[in-house]
Amino acid sequence: MEQSVAIRRFTDVSPWDADLVPTLAVHLLGPVDVRFSDVTITLDRPLERALVARLSLARGVAVSDERLARDLWGDVDLARPRERLRVLASRLRANLGEASSALSRTGAGYVLDAEPSDVVAAEQALSDGSREAVASALALWRGDSLADLRAVPFGFAEGERLDALRVDLRVALLAGSQEAGAGIELRAELEELVSEHPLHERLSCMLALASRRHCPVPTRPSPSPNASVTPSAPPTWA
């Protein structure tokens, strides 16, 4: 069972110096990228990257051994999952170096003092809704989300969820352009998105609107003032 716990910082500092404290940064909108003080931490083992990704997605909530084991190894019958997690966590701490204290264990499970900062920024941009924020958020993707963890049990579903966020941001950006009067220039991108996501109702509606703007309703030509008008024959009733 997951329980909320307080996120622990690396050192005790005053609030005035909080921005100066080095923090662990985790990026998931692409292959997993981990940095400390803006220096990349190389994690060669996929399971170490998976542990960082999974715990960062919990955002300060302790994840139980049972849940972690299921997310990392699936529903297979693991022998001594707690011991396997302990070994994995020990290896991860060693590779985190100066940031090793970011990973801790509580009575409720493992906790990582880090958030997926690019995911948080993308979610905030979608909530904000401004064109500038949405465009900046879309630039955060470096390929498919969790691209290097799709073979890990939780990685595929979570990667698809994060990529759906990317689609929502693209839709928001296109919708803003459409509301401003854009039409035919959006059609190609909308057709591509609809082909990739045929069940996305809003995309289908936006494509229909763009198509209507591209094809104006024909108007009946006005008769020439010199044209003779032939009266129609009266109806014949049986």
Image (cartoon, grey):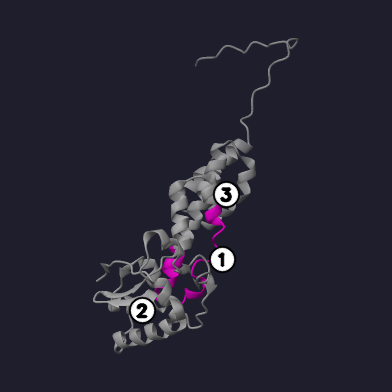
> Left or right: where does residue 225 sit relative to residue 193?
right
Q: Which residue is pictured at 40% across the width and 68% down the height?
A: 114
Nearest-to-viewer mark from 1 and 2:
1
Residue receiving disc 3: 190
Q: Position of residue 92 (x, y in %)?
A: 42, 82
Nearest-to-viewer mark from 1 and 3:
1
**Mark 2 residue type:** Gly
**Mark 1 residue type:** Gly
Residue receiving disc 1: 143
Q: Position of residue 178 (x, y in %)?
A: 56, 40
How crowded pointer 1 is (Cα within 10 Å; few <14, some 14-19, many 20+) is rated as few
Q: Confirm whether the magenta stretch covers residue 156.
A: yes
Identify the mark nearer the N-term, 1 or 3: 1
> Left or right: where does residue 140 sit relative to residue 93?
right
How crowded pointer 2 is (Cα within 10 Å; few <14, some 14-19, many 20+) is rated as some
> Which residue in the rendered view is the most extreme toward the bottom?
79
Q: Confirm whether the magenta stretch covers residue 160.
A: yes
Residue receiving disc 2: 74
For label 3, the SS is helix
Q: Position of residue 26 (x, y in %)?
A: 46, 69
Q: Nearer the viewer, residue 118 or 77?
A: 118
The quarter of the picture where the N terminus appears is bottom left
**Mark 3 residue type:** Leu
For label 1, the SS is loop
* Magenta highlight range: 136-161
Nearest-to-viewer mark from 2 and 3:
2
Q: How far is the residue under mark 2 from the one under mark 3?
A: 37 Å
Q: Which residue is pictured at 50% across the width and 80% down the height?
A: 43
Q: Nearer the viewer, residue 32 or 185?
A: 32
